[in-house]
Image (tube, rainbow, N blue to C red):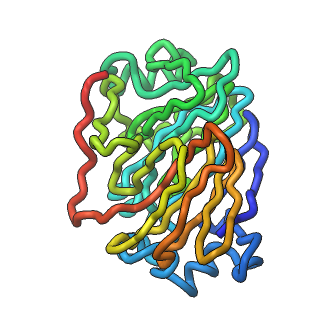
Amino acid sequence: MRFLPDTQEMPWGTVEYKLADLGFVDSMACEGWLKGNTLSDIMQTYLERVVGETSFNWYGTQFPVLVKRLTVKGHTSLHVTADDEVAEQRYDSFGKTALWYVEAAGPQAKLWLGFKQDVTAEAFFNACEDNAVEPLLHSIKPKAGETYLIMPGMVHAAQDVTLIEIAECSELWFRLFDWGSEDRELHLEEAFDLIDFKKYRVGNKKDSGVAIAVTPQFTVNKFPLTQALKSTRDEDDTFLLYYCTKGAAVIQADKVNYQLKQGDLLLVPAETAEFFLLPDGNNTELLEVRMDPREEEDIVSEPVDE
């Protein structure tokens, strides 16, 4: 399945939703026999045939992940997100864990992720009031091809960079600081107890070769496509998303070829038992998004110091 993008203008650039089932954004299929149907309509009708049993058990009729491109020309405000438990209790919503893939980085590119050192809640609050937050933040000069996992509680912002965000299907986030601007509402008091005030840490990644993110919410693999690959699903009941970061590829399923150029996204439904991934030229690279089986009490691996 291929879907039409939905682009929205922001004060700092643009957000292009590649795939989302959010209500205010509802991606529409643009080819095939489901052309003209929205993702929410498809989910209401086909459920497990599209996403698989694991996803359906946890997320019901909502598609479980979103994919969007953030073209950040200025800089975003400083945000934080909630975990699933808090989001459900307070807002009747899913929380938000996200992966940022750096598609392009400008000369002034910067990511702010967490804090340089442990800070007190009082020190951060005062810094927000005094427009002096940046010295407290851990900053990174990103490069194209890098990935960063944005966990609930981690303060984060971006500047002069193009990001592919793969995230739990939620836009529940809170604006903590806006670099002195008073044009947009802040949620500092509302979200203060969500913030992780510890020094920035990098989470463990499971040693699965091509895996760049392994969380209860989603798994993301990145791999070069240098030769034809055959996928046979067997007991695997997850949907698969493929995003082309470099080159071009073809997904061949049921004797139909689906082109995948750089920047394209395709959804392979869970019921597709067999398909082929074929490189269409040199230097092809893909991101694969999937949902692996979840235990009732899922815990993301404990982070370690960078």
* Left-right relation of 43 to 306: right
> Quadrant location of residue 115?
top left
Camera-side residue: 232 or 263?
232
> Quadrant location of residue 78?
top right
Camera-side residue: 105 or 70?
105
Asked whether residue 172 appears in the rendered view, the answer is yes
Asked if 132 appears above or below 207 in the picture, the reply is: above
Camera-side residue: 7 or 127?
7
Q: Which residue is drawn at 68% across and 25% down?
A: 160
Q: Position of residue 290 (x, y in %)?
A: 44, 59
Can you name the residue that lies furthest to the top here?
135
Q: Where is residue 20 in the image (x, y as percent from the top left)?
A: 61, 62
Q: Residue at x 52, y 53 (%)?
A: 172
Q: Where is residue 55 in the image (x, y as percent from the top left)?
A: 41, 70
Asked whether residue 61 appears in the rendered view, the answer is no
Q: Position of residue 164 (x, y in %)?
A: 60, 42
Q: Which residue is drawn at 57% across and 42% down?
A: 285
Query: Number of callouts in the render?
Result: 0
Asked if 221 appears above or below 23 in the picture, the reply is: above
Q: Quadrant of the N terminus?
A: bottom right
* Left-right relation of 38 to 268: right
Q: In which quarter of the image is the C terminus?
A: top left
Q: Residue at x 42, y 27 (%)?
A: 114
